[in-house]
Image: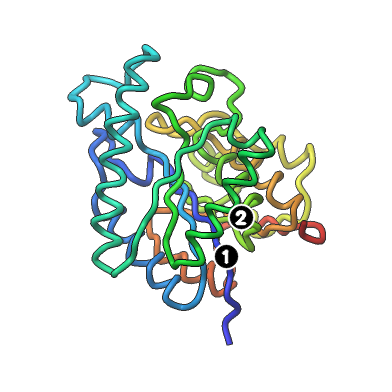
């Protein structure tokens, strides 16, 4: 009998949007289909979704991603509305209810807020609702402007949510197949590392810089997220989000992408 898990899935801007910034509707629909089916099999699912600024910029007909803080926050407000409309629509096809949770750094640092958040997640999951989480870009200037972001294109946010919700697995959907010994976009002989038992300085040395031009997170932020989650005993999988059906394999415990093994007794 397949083990049932509490699974946090993080999806980035590059997975949800086309190169021109328009929403990739098939990605939303496929994600809703697979996550609904995984939940139907007895698992609990939390989705951490990026894409608000990119989608909002396109909907506002901006020629490029805005540079001014006020315009970034305006784009985020519009884009988040569009994102939730699409998730509500596509998850609704499979008789699923979604809930929006928007967070900023203060929500995670303050112990009382953190406890309230954990209780909210618990209540939603008990009711079979799928929480959709994003960083609150429309009011949080720190995450947009800071060079050392706490969340970093929601990679760290997904790890924080996984720890907060006592998840069994964190899946980070990227635009490449996993963690390589060198950047596969630059080196044809790059090899995928299937399993990492411990993250140390040598692992960080393999991580590259920034990610795609539509997102802000590179492999280093994903590695930092994996470091945080595995320290709490949560298994982390980094894999390609091009085909969300790969999540079936993750839920079943089959090897895909790169597995970072949770390294100590949990909580």
Where 98 sits versus 44, above or below? Answer: above
Q: How many marks?
A: 2
Mark 1: few, some, or many residues within 10 Å (few <14, many ≥20)? some
| Image coordinates for residue 134, horizontal then vertical, percent | 45, 40
Mark 1 or mark 2, earlier in chain? 1
The structure residue drawn at horizontal position 53% and vertical position 54%, both measured from the top left corner, is 121
Q: Which residue is mark 1?
A: 6
Q: Is residue 175 visible?
A: no
Q: In the shown orientation, is residue 263 left or right of residue 104?
A: right
| Image coordinates for residue 255, horizontal then vertical, percent | 59, 68
Q: Looking at the rendering, in which quadrant would you find the C terminus? A: bottom right
Name the residue nearer the viewer: 139 or 238: 139
| Image coordinates for residue 239, horizontal then vertical, percent | 52, 55
Q: CA distance from mark 1 to mark 2?
A: 8 Å
The structure residue drawn at horizontal position 53% and vertical position 52%, both measured from the top left corner, is 120
Where 17 sits versus 231, above or below? Answer: above
Q: In the shown orientation, is residue 144 left or right of residue 165?
A: left
Name the residue nearer the viewer: 169 or 77: 77
Q: Which residue is mark 2?
A: 165
Name the residue nearer the viewer: 236 or 53: 53
- Asked if the residue under mark 2 is in contact with the one under mark 1, i.e. CB atoms within 8 Å, the reply is yes
| Helix, strand or loop at mark 2 | loop
The structure residue drawn at horizontal position 18% and vertical position 24%, both measured from the top left corner, is 61
């Amino acid at each position: 009998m397949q083990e049932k898990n509490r699974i946090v899935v993080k999806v980035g801007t590059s997975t949800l949007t086309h190169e021109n910034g328009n929403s990739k509707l098939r990605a939303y629909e496929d994600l809703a289909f697979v996550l609904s089916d995984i939940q139907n099999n007895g698992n609990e699912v939390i989705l951490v979704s990026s894409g608000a600024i990119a989608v909002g910029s396109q909907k506002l007909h901006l020629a490029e991603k805005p540079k001014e803080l006020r315009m970034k926050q305006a784009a985020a407000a519009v884009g988040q509305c569009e994102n939730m409309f699409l998730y509500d629509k596509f998850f609704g096809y499979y008789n699923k209810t979604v809930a929006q949770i928007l967070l900023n750094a203060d929500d995670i640092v303050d112990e009382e807020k953190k406890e309230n958040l954990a209780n909210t997640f618990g209540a939603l999951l008990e009711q079979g609702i799928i929480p959709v989480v994003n960083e609150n870009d429309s009011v949080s200037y720190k995450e947009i402007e800071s060079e050392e972001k706490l969340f970093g294109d929601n990679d760290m946010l997904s790890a924080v949510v996984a720890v907060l919700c006592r998840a069994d697995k964190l899946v980070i959907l990227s635009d490449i197949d996993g963690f390589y010994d060198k950047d596969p976009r630059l080196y044809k002989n790059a090899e995928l590392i299937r399993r990492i038992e411990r993250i140390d300085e040598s692992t960080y040395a393999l991580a590259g810089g920034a990610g795609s031009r539509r997102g802000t997170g590179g492999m280093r932020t994903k590695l930092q997220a994996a470091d945080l989650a595995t320290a709490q005993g949560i298994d982390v999988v980094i894999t390609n989000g091009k085909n969300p059906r790969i999540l079936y394999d993750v839920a079943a415990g089959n090897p895909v992408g790169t597995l970072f093994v949770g390294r100590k007794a949990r909580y």
